[in-house]
Image (cartoon, coloured by chain):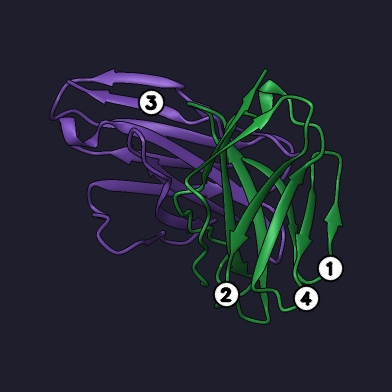
Chain colours: A purple, B green
Protein backbone atom coordinates (compact mmCIF):
# COMPACT_ATOMS: atom_id res chain seq x y z
CA UNK A 1 0.00 0.00 0.00
CA UNK A 2 0.91 3.65 -0.27
CA UNK A 3 2.92 5.37 2.43
CA UNK A 4 2.01 8.43 4.47
CA UNK A 5 4.49 9.95 6.88
CA UNK A 6 4.01 12.36 9.76
CA UNK A 7 6.47 14.60 11.49
CA UNK A 8 7.14 14.80 14.33
CA UNK A 9 6.11 11.44 15.76
CA UNK A 10 5.79 12.99 19.18
CA UNK A 11 6.07 16.51 20.60
CA UNK A 12 5.87 18.11 24.00
CA UNK A 13 5.08 21.80 24.19
CA UNK A 14 4.18 24.37 26.80
CA UNK A 15 0.70 25.74 27.21
CA UNK A 16 0.10 28.78 25.01
CA UNK A 17 2.57 27.85 22.29
CA UNK A 18 1.79 26.63 18.78
CA UNK A 19 2.76 23.31 17.25
CA UNK A 20 2.90 22.32 13.57
CA UNK A 21 2.45 18.74 12.41
CA UNK A 22 3.35 17.72 8.86
CA UNK A 23 1.69 14.99 6.84
CA UNK A 24 3.26 13.79 3.61
CA UNK A 25 2.16 11.24 1.03
CA UNK A 26 5.45 9.69 -0.06
CA UNK A 27 4.59 7.68 -3.15
CA UNK A 28 1.27 9.00 -4.35
CA UNK A 29 -0.51 12.30 -4.83
CA UNK A 30 -3.35 12.66 -2.39
CA UNK A 31 -6.35 14.42 -3.84
CA UNK A 32 -7.66 14.89 -0.35
CA UNK A 33 -6.09 14.71 3.07
CA UNK A 34 -7.87 14.21 6.36
CA UNK A 35 -6.96 15.00 9.95
CA UNK A 36 -8.16 12.93 12.89
CA UNK A 37 -7.73 13.17 16.64
CA UNK A 38 -7.80 10.26 19.04
CA UNK A 39 -8.00 10.45 22.83
CA UNK A 40 -6.93 7.47 24.97
CA UNK A 41 -9.27 4.50 24.83
CA UNK A 42 -11.44 6.26 22.23
CA UNK A 43 -11.98 5.94 18.50
CA UNK A 44 -10.66 8.30 15.85
CA UNK A 45 -12.59 11.52 15.43
CA UNK A 46 -12.47 13.29 12.09
CA UNK A 47 -11.42 16.92 12.51
CA UNK A 48 -11.22 18.26 8.98
CA UNK A 49 -10.94 17.51 5.29
CA UNK A 50 -8.52 19.40 3.08
CA UNK A 51 -8.12 19.54 -0.67
CA UNK A 52 -5.00 20.88 -2.28
CA UNK A 53 -5.18 24.61 -2.86
CA UNK A 54 -8.47 25.21 -1.09
CA UNK A 55 -9.66 25.90 2.42
CA UNK A 56 -10.20 22.99 4.75
CA UNK A 57 -13.67 21.83 5.70
CA UNK A 58 -13.98 21.38 9.45
CA UNK A 59 -16.30 18.97 11.23
CA UNK A 60 -18.87 20.36 13.60
CA UNK A 61 -17.39 21.39 16.91
CA UNK A 62 -13.81 21.73 15.65
CA UNK A 63 -12.44 25.26 15.99
CA UNK A 64 -10.98 26.30 12.66
CA UNK A 65 -9.04 29.19 14.20
CA UNK A 66 -7.39 26.87 16.66
CA UNK A 67 -6.55 24.04 14.29
CA UNK A 68 -5.09 25.64 11.17
CA UNK A 69 -4.79 23.36 8.17
CA UNK A 70 -2.73 24.12 5.08
CA UNK A 71 -2.69 21.84 2.05
CA UNK A 72 -0.12 23.47 -0.19
CA UNK A 73 0.54 20.55 -2.51
CA UNK A 74 -0.76 17.11 -3.43
CA UNK A 75 1.83 15.54 -1.14
CA UNK A 76 1.88 17.83 1.90
CA UNK A 77 -0.67 18.97 4.45
CA UNK A 78 0.08 20.65 7.76
CA UNK A 79 -1.93 20.99 10.96
CA UNK A 80 -1.02 23.80 13.35
CA UNK A 81 -2.42 23.68 16.85
CA UNK A 82 -2.42 27.32 17.94
CA UNK A 83 -2.23 28.43 21.58
CA UNK A 84 -2.19 24.83 22.71
CA UNK A 85 -3.66 23.87 26.07
CA UNK A 86 -3.42 20.63 28.05
CA UNK A 87 -6.84 19.53 26.77
CA UNK A 88 -5.37 19.54 23.23
CA UNK A 89 -3.04 16.71 24.25
CA UNK A 90 -3.98 13.86 21.96
CA UNK A 91 -2.88 11.52 19.17
CA UNK A 92 -3.22 13.32 15.82
CA UNK A 93 -3.42 11.19 12.69
CA UNK A 94 -3.57 12.22 9.05
CA UNK A 95 -4.60 10.26 6.01
CA UNK A 96 -4.51 10.74 2.28
CA UNK A 97 -6.62 9.34 -0.48
CA UNK A 98 -7.76 9.56 -4.04
CA UNK A 99 -11.22 10.51 -5.20
CA UNK A 100 -13.66 7.66 -5.63
CA UNK A 101 -14.17 4.34 -3.85
CA UNK A 102 -10.51 3.92 -2.99
CA UNK A 103 -8.85 3.22 0.28
CA UNK A 104 -7.25 5.91 2.41
CA UNK A 105 -3.75 5.55 3.72
CA UNK A 106 -2.97 6.69 7.23
CA UNK A 107 0.11 8.18 8.75
CA UNK A 108 1.68 6.73 11.91
CA UNK A 109 0.29 9.51 14.07
CA UNK A 110 1.77 12.32 16.18
CA UNK A 111 1.52 12.24 19.95
CA UNK A 112 1.07 15.79 21.29
CA UNK A 113 1.49 16.50 24.97
CA UNK A 114 0.84 20.03 26.22
CA UNK A 115 2.24 20.82 29.66
CA UNK B 1 -23.21 7.63 6.11
CA UNK B 2 -24.81 4.48 7.47
CA UNK B 3 -24.03 3.51 11.04
CA UNK B 4 -22.32 0.23 11.86
CA UNK B 5 -22.56 -2.02 14.90
CA UNK B 6 -19.71 -4.29 15.98
CA UNK B 7 -19.05 -6.38 19.08
CA UNK B 8 -16.87 -4.54 21.55
CA UNK B 9 -14.33 -7.31 21.88
CA UNK B 10 -13.49 -10.82 20.68
CA UNK B 11 -10.87 -13.44 21.40
CA UNK B 12 -9.31 -15.82 18.91
CA UNK B 13 -6.79 -18.62 19.28
CA UNK B 14 -3.57 -18.24 17.33
CA UNK B 15 -3.70 -20.14 14.04
CA UNK B 16 -7.47 -20.24 13.96
CA UNK B 17 -9.72 -18.15 11.73
CA UNK B 18 -10.98 -14.90 13.21
CA UNK B 19 -14.47 -13.95 12.07
CA UNK B 20 -15.41 -10.37 12.85
CA UNK B 21 -19.06 -9.43 12.26
CA UNK B 22 -20.45 -6.04 11.38
CA UNK B 23 -24.06 -4.94 11.13
CA UNK B 24 -24.93 -2.11 8.74
CA UNK B 25 -28.67 -2.52 8.30
CA UNK B 26 -29.21 1.04 7.01
CA UNK B 27 -26.59 0.85 4.27
CA UNK B 28 -27.48 2.59 1.01
CA UNK B 29 -27.03 1.18 -2.46
CA UNK B 30 -23.98 3.31 -3.25
CA UNK B 31 -22.17 2.75 0.04
CA UNK B 32 -19.12 0.55 0.27
CA UNK B 33 -18.05 -1.48 3.29
CA UNK B 34 -14.48 -0.79 4.42
CA UNK B 35 -12.41 -2.52 7.06
CA UNK B 36 -9.44 -0.97 8.80
CA UNK B 37 -7.49 -2.03 11.83
CA UNK B 38 -5.45 -0.11 14.36
CA UNK B 39 -2.65 -1.65 16.31
CA UNK B 40 -1.98 0.13 19.59
CA UNK B 41 -0.48 3.63 19.16
CA UNK B 42 -0.25 3.36 15.37
CA UNK B 43 -2.24 4.81 12.50
CA UNK B 44 -5.06 2.68 11.05
CA UNK B 45 -4.19 0.16 8.37
CA UNK B 46 -6.44 -0.54 5.39
CA UNK B 47 -7.54 -4.17 5.13
CA UNK B 48 -10.20 -4.59 2.47
CA UNK B 49 -13.37 -3.08 1.04
CA UNK B 50 -16.33 -4.19 -1.07
CA UNK B 51 -19.69 -3.16 -2.46
CA UNK B 52 -21.75 -6.29 -3.13
CA UNK B 53 -19.50 -9.19 -3.94
CA UNK B 54 -17.27 -11.06 -1.57
CA UNK B 55 -13.68 -9.91 -1.73
CA UNK B 56 -10.37 -11.53 -0.85
CA UNK B 57 -6.84 -10.21 -0.69
CA UNK B 58 -3.59 -11.25 0.93
CA UNK B 59 -4.75 -10.06 4.34
CA UNK B 60 -8.35 -11.13 4.65
CA UNK B 61 -11.68 -12.03 3.11
CA UNK B 62 -14.82 -9.93 3.22
CA UNK B 63 -18.18 -11.66 3.10
CA UNK B 64 -21.17 -9.39 2.46
CA UNK B 65 -24.68 -10.79 2.84
CA UNK B 66 -26.96 -10.68 -0.16
CA UNK B 67 -29.13 -7.95 1.38
CA UNK B 68 -25.93 -6.07 2.28
CA UNK B 69 -27.16 -5.45 5.81
CA UNK B 70 -24.20 -7.19 7.41
CA UNK B 71 -20.72 -8.38 6.64
CA UNK B 72 -17.96 -10.51 8.13
CA UNK B 73 -14.24 -9.96 7.98
CA UNK B 74 -12.30 -13.20 8.04
CA UNK B 75 -8.64 -13.46 8.99
CA UNK B 76 -7.96 -17.03 7.91
CA UNK B 77 -5.05 -17.85 10.20
CA UNK B 78 -4.82 -15.31 12.99
CA UNK B 79 -1.42 -14.54 14.49
CA UNK B 80 -0.47 -12.61 17.60
CA UNK B 81 0.35 -9.63 15.37
CA UNK B 82 -3.30 -9.47 14.33
CA UNK B 83 -4.23 -8.26 17.82
CA UNK B 84 -5.77 -4.83 17.14
CA UNK B 85 -8.98 -2.83 17.03
CA UNK B 86 -10.89 -3.59 13.83
CA UNK B 87 -13.17 -0.96 12.36
CA UNK B 88 -16.01 -1.60 9.94
CA UNK B 89 -17.03 1.58 8.10
CA UNK B 90 -19.57 2.24 5.39
CA UNK B 91 -18.94 5.08 3.02
CA UNK B 92 -20.27 6.31 -0.29
CA UNK B 93 -17.82 7.63 -2.84
CA UNK B 94 -19.70 10.90 -3.07
CA UNK B 95 -19.03 11.82 0.55
CA UNK B 96 -15.69 13.36 -0.19
CA UNK B 97 -13.88 10.24 0.88
CA UNK B 98 -14.09 10.83 4.61
CA UNK B 99 -14.24 7.88 6.97
CA UNK B 100 -16.31 8.05 10.13
CA UNK B 101 -14.96 5.62 12.71
CA UNK B 102 -17.16 3.84 15.23
CA UNK B 103 -15.88 2.07 18.33
CA UNK B 104 -14.68 -1.04 16.50
CA UNK B 105 -13.97 -4.54 17.78
CA UNK B 106 -10.93 -5.16 19.95
CA UNK B 107 -9.58 -8.51 18.76
CA UNK B 108 -7.20 -10.35 21.05
CA UNK B 109 -5.33 -13.25 19.51
CA UNK B 110 -4.12 -15.60 22.21
CA UNK B 111 -1.39 -18.25 22.05
Q: Label 4, label 2: how many angstroms apart (C-alpha)?
A: 12 Å
**On-image quarter of the C terminus of chain B:** top right
Residue B75: quarter of image = top right
Subunit ID for the residue under disc 4: B
Q: Which residue is mark 1?
A: B53
Instruction: Give the secondary structure at mark 2.
Output: loop
Q: Earlier in the sequence, mark 4 or mark 1?
A: 1
Subunit ID for the residue under disc 3: A
Q: Which residue is painted at 68% across and 57% down in the image?
A: A98
Q: Position of residue A75 (x, y in %)?
A: 62, 42
Q: Are marks 4 and 3 in contact (CB under 8 Å)?
A: no
Is residue A74 visible in the rendered image? The answer is no
Q: Which residue is mark 2?
A: B25
In the image, is B50 to the left or to the right of A40? right
Which of discs 4 and 3 lies nearer the camera? The answer is 4
In the image, is A78 to the left or to the right of B98? left
Which of discs 1 and 3 lies nearer the camera? The answer is 1
Q: Which residue is mark 4?
A: B66
Q: Which residue is painted at 84% across and 62% down in the image?
A: B54
Q: Label 4, label 3: how many angstroms apart (C-alpha)?
A: 42 Å
Q: Label 4, label 1: how many angstroms apart (C-alpha)?
A: 8 Å
Amino acid sequence: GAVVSQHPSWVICKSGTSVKIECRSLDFQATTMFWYRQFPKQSLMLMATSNEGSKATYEQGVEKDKFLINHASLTLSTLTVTSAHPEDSSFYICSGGLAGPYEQYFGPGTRLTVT
Amino acid sequence: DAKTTQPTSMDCAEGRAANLPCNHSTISGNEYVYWYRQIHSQGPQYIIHGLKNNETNEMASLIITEDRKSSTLILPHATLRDTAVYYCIVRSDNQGGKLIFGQGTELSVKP
